Image (tube, rainbow, N blue to C red):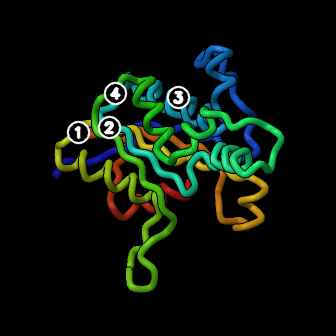
Amino acid sequence: MRKVYLISHSSLRAGDAEPDYRQLFSPIEARRMGALMKRAVWTSAEALKAAGVEVPDAIITATDFGCIRNSEDFLKAMKGLVDAPMKPTHFMQSTHNTISSLLAIRLKCHGYNATYSHRVSGGQASTIPMGSFESALLDAYMQIALGDIDNALVGCFDETTPDLEAAFPGVVVPRATSLVLGCEGSVELTPENLRDLCGN
């Protein structure tokens, strides 16, 4: 088993100022992307640049509700709750694996690509209940430790909306967090400290 290291990370949380996306997106691209997708691409680009990695061996993302704003917009239009036409973009960007797919297309990454989409699982029967971010980190950790890949881009991306907040108060932590894990570095990771990493 190889050692696994945290090489770099980048994060945007609720209340943080929006970065200048003009260096990453054309005006047309930016118009078609929701805020969460832009934040995910930006934090991923920053983490990869800091790690000196152009194309990661794997992209593994985690989310509780995916691009929920797009999902809500599409469903409201479909139900006639808003005076606006249904937009195909809202439907296409409403799935939970939208962000990991977008990152793979932009980076031309043809390697392993997975999205974990669940809140804490396991219940009382499990001694180690795991959320989606922990599952994504553990997946990357095991693949690097076993020598299947040398590095991975791991992200945790979530947003909230007034409707979601009303239904599940305080449940979602709006953030875009990207990390690069690899087989070389200075900050060693262990299965035991992966959970601590999820809270930062």
Disc 1 is placed on an element classified as loop
Distance of label 4 from label 2 (alpha carbons): 8 Å
- Residue type at mark 3 is Glu
- Residue type at mark 4 is Cys
Distance of label 3 from label 1 (alpha carbons): 21 Å
Distance of label 4 from label 1 (alpha carbons): 13 Å
Q: Nearer the viewer, residue 191 or 186?
A: 191
* Residues under numbered marks 2 and 1 in contact, where contact means CB atoms less than 8 Å apart: yes
Q: Nearer the viewer, residue 81 or 130?
A: 81
Q: Which numbered tag is attached to residue 58?
A: 2
Mark earlier in primary sequence (4, 2): 2
Disc 3 is placed on an element classified as helix
- The residue drawn where x is 50% and y is 33% is 44
Q: Is residue 173 left or right of residue 77?
A: left
| Comparing labels 2 and 1, the label whose residue is closer to the camera | 2
> Can you give x and y, in whole percent of width and height, for residue 54 in the image?
38, 22
Q: Which residue bears the numbered disc 1?
A: 149
- For disc 4, the neighbor class at 10 Å (few under 14, some 14 to 19, many from 20) is some
* Residues under numbered marks 4 and 2 in contact, where contact means CB atoms less than 8 Å apart: yes
